[in-house]
Amino acid sequence: MAGQSANLLLLFLPFLLCTSVPAALTEEASSAYEVLQRHGLPIGLLPKGVREFRLDDDGRFEVHLKEECTAKFETEVHYNRNITGLISYGQIAAISGVSAQELFLWFPVRGIRVDIPSTGLIYFDVGVIHKQFSLSLFETPPDCPSAAASSRDRLHEGSTIAQIVSKVPPFLPSLPPFL
């Protein structure tokens, strides 16, 4: 009897492995972009160039980029090399590694959500304020130049502006010095 049980187990073992392994491989093979879509979020929330992505059963995720970078939407969004958060349908909470620029200040993004059903808007929680953007801005993953390249570009833009301004004649005639 024990011999027959062992033979049955050996007979069904390949079948069991074939049916259970593909599900595990599919979950591991899911890209960060596919996971965003399955949770009702636009794939453009993450930039191009995701190197590694992990998601656990509780919705906690880790994204690893090649290098930190800054992407442009209506404002700039900075991505650290490592991004973590908690994803559920229509939102990401407890985000770390993402910040958004407002005027000249950078604020850490704490959460992102979309309306269900969709109103065409996406909301970024940056602490004291909630920024709202058109969902269409996030339809595709943005190009995201490295943060070092972005800094060099801004420095170059700043020096170009300074050169132009230095060539503009003053608007006011020369005034006598204050007494």
Image (spheres, rainbow, N blue to C red):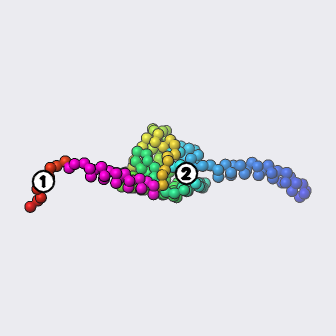
Residue type at mark 2? Gly
Residue 32 placed where, x, y %?
Answer: 57, 50
Name, please, the residue furthest toward the bottom. Answer: 179
Closer-to-camera residue (68/126):
68
Give left or right: position of 142 versus 175.
right
* Residue to which mark 2 is pinned: 49
Q: Main secondary structure of the magenta part?
A: helix
Magenta stretch, residue numbers = 148-170
Task: Name the residue at 64% across, 50% down.
Answer: 29
Q: Secondary structure at mark 1?
A: loop
- Earlier in the chain: of badge 2 and badge 1, it is 2
Q: Are marks 2 and 1 in contact (CB under 8 Å)?
A: no
The image quadrant where one finds the N terminus is bottom right
Tell me the tag on residue 175: 1
Q: Is residue 78 at least partly visible in the picture?
A: no
Q: Residues within 10 Å of mark 1 (few under 14, many from 20)?
A: few
Q: Nearer the viewer, mark 2 or mark 1?
A: 1
Residue type at mark 1? Leu
Residue 37 placed where, x, y %?
Answer: 56, 44
- The answer to if 131 sits in the magenta stretch is no
Closer-to-camera residue (165/65):
165
Q: Secondary structure at mark 2?
A: loop
